[in-house]
Amino acid sequence: MKALEGIKVLDFTHVQSGPTCTQLLAWFGADVIKVERPGVGDATRKQLVDVPGADSLYFTMLNHNKRSIEIDSKNEMGKKVLTRLIEECDVLVENFAPGAIDRMGFSWERVHKINPRIIMASIKGFGPGQYEDCKVYENIAQCAGGSASTTGFRDGPPVVTGAQIGDSGTGVHLCLGIVTALFQRERSGRGQRVTVAMQDAVLNLARVKMRDQQRLAAGPLTEYSQFGEGIPFGDTVPRAGNDSGGGQPGRILKCKGWETDPNAYTYFICQAPVWEKICDLIGEPGWKTDPGYATPPARLDKLNLIFERIERWTMTKTKVEIMDLCNPLDIPVGPILSMKEIAADDGLFATGTMVRVDHPERGPYLSVGCPIKMSESPTDVVRSPLLGEHTTEVLTDVLGFAGEELQRIIASGAVGKVKAAAAE
């Protein structure tokens, strides 16, 4: 039995943030019913298409293990079907633009009245305040949440990260909120509203920089390269390049082959407990007893020189060789792995972190599997649904419509034409 088996989720989400949340719920065993606009569906089905006539990888990789039903929410019969689904489901998830779900006639007050036990979960760009009605996308969230201002190098512009901390990061936060609300419902018997703002989620992921903002009042941030270079700090957290954010000096350094391989780099941390091992490894045994290098405070103004010396050593080794040499010594290092290298890592496929999926329209493709492993709730990755693939199935199996009643729904135009014809 999977962890969320028996939980029904009405999925009004689209693009990335909401689908990330509902895909996690589906991986954990929930029956996720994705509501899509007839004939159109989730916008990402046709974004960044690489196989003509097939759903894009953008859509398929975010909508595994779900069922798709086409419903026209502007159609009166469609509204009745949605109302019945709200009655039957445990969770409703949406990430529409501000006010859109209310204009559809399904405000939290109405949804809660229809089903007092339902969890209604929403993703918004900003929380209550002057920007709450603004639409937000990934990079906007990274900028408004403080991540971009603290990412990049001091002499360059703010930079957004390739990790989708705005969209997917918010979806993960919302998933936790939903599961927590379901747990509380077991004791209270009541549903509740769960909301996560993308700005808030990004700020939570960037909270160590808020830590540093407050530390500035006590003086310069000594673990930043800027301190060792003698450059004064301003009144806000600066961009720190590839410095470690945890107080342990770290840098991305060139490895053997960097001239032709853009990913021939390693991340190297000069952790204090292994400093003497680092000195021996790179051929600087004298640094172990030199007063200017022997202690962490003494090294702070020499970090550039230290990492330049370490880099002269790393440039003689491949990033894999560096892992093999440093790990037995407990020296923290990590290779810069490209997506191509990750896609060829058999170990990731063995754990289900990477998966191969067959799709009837596009054929086989690679995807990222569930990153959370549970010993009593195995995860199977099932291909994403075709548009409206489960319309009839949901109407009959979940809502119990049959016979003339089912035909009236079909005739009303409330559901997709293709599936309506199949039902007939």
Image (spheres, rainbow, N blue to C red):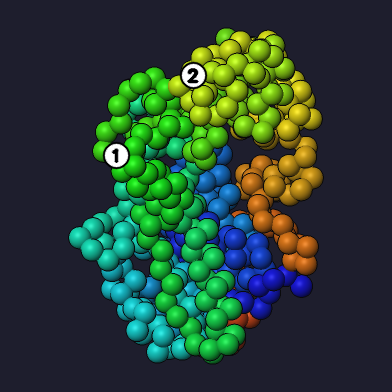
What amino acid is labelled 2 in the image? Lys
Q: Count neighbours of disc 1 (C-alpha within 10 A) and say few if under 14, some if 14 to 19, many if 20 or more.
A: some
Residue at 69% across, 14% down: 285
Query: Residue 198's spot in the image, x, y percent?
Result: 38, 56
Above or below — where is 251 with respect to 109? Answer: above
What amino acid is labelled 1 in the image? Thr
Classify mark 2: helix, strand or loop. helix
Q: Describe residue 277's horizontal placement relative to residue 136 as left or right.
A: right
Residue at 31% across, 43% down: 217
Above or below — where is 3 with respect to 327? Answer: below
Q: Describe residue 286's horizontal placement relative to residue 406 as left or right.
A: right
Residue at 56% across, 44% down: 57
Instruction: Give the labeled residue for mark 2.
Output: 302
Say the numbered circle drawn on residue 142. none
Q: Count neighbours of disc 2 (C-alpha within 10 A) and say few if under 14, some if 14 to 19, many if 20 or more.
A: some
Q: Describe residue 391's horizontal placement relative to residue 330 as left or right.
A: left
Say the numbered circle drawn on residue 236. 1
Q: Nearer the viewer, mark 2 or mark 1?
A: 2
Query: Residue 266's spot in the image, x, y percent?
Result: 62, 24
Residue at 57% across, 50% down: 60
The C terminus: image quadrant: bottom right
Q: Describe residue 28's horizontal placement relative to residue 174 as left or right.
A: right
Rendering quarter of residue 102 = bottom left
Rendering quarter of residue 346 = top right
Q: Earlier in the sequence, mark 2 or mark 1?
A: 1
Query: Residue 369's spot in the image, x, y percent?
Result: 66, 50
Viewer-nearest residue: 10 or 346: 346
Classify mark 1: helix, strand or loop. loop
Above or below — where is 388 with respect to 157? Answer: below
Query: Residue 363's spot in the image, x, y percent?
Result: 67, 44
Answer yes or no: is residue 30 visible.
yes
Answer yes or no: is residue 360 visible.
no
